Amino acid sequence: MLYILLIPFILQAILMLIDEAFFHLRRGLPRWERIGHPIDTLSFIVCLLVTQFFPCTTATLLWYIVLALASCLLITKDEFVHKHHCPVGEQWIHSVLFVNHPFMLTALALIWYATTTLHTPPKLLLAVAQHKPTTIIFLKGQTIFALVFMGYQIIFWNILWKMKKNK
């Protein structure tokens, strides 16, 4: 079960790499996307941080659900801009990312529950609970990766790319 829960994270990383390397770098990003993409990443980071710093209780799970739903809605905000700037292939990548996002946030919630609940997790999540140290390292790695990626989005697109474009 643990490996199944990792699939959305792996898919997200692959699709983001394709989106960045084959589409964004080729076409450049207008100002709206240069601002919006780090905000999208931040909405995911907030969900990750909840799982890092709080145990999964009824109250924290409800907060997580609100944050996850907000993240799912927030990431679609650029589609009004994308329809004018993106080729069909990039729009397809975005649609797969939109479909994957709630699966990834659900997997994150299940991992969080299995590793922090005071109760014995359901049988399907026992394998996750049994690999708690590895799972916690994975979550910390995801958080670091997301923070680094957001830093890249801010620094590359809003400073370095703009300097290169203005030369």
Image (cartoon, rainbow, N blue to C red):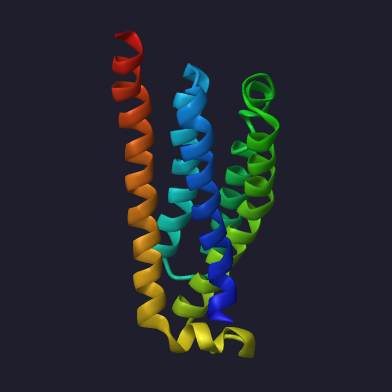
Residue 160 shows in the view: yes
Q: Nearer the viewer, residue 3 or 18?
A: 18
| Quadrant assignment for the C terminus | top left
- Residue at screen point 37% across, 73% down: 136
- Residue 149: percent from left, percent from top: 37, 44
Measured along the vertical axis of the image, is residue 75 above or below residue 63? above
Q: Nearer the viewer, residue 9 or 127?
A: 9
Q: Nearer the viewer, residue 152 or 166?
A: 166
- Residue at screen point 44% across, 49% down: 46
Measured along the vertical axis of the image, is residue 72 above or below residue 76? below
Q: Nearer the viewer, residue 141 or 157?
A: 157
- Residue 107: percent from left, percent from top: 58, 67
82 lies left or right of 137: right
- Residue 66: percent from left, percent from top: 60, 50
- Residue at screen point 61% across, 28% down: 78
Measured along the vertical axis of the image, is residue 133 above or below residue 151? below
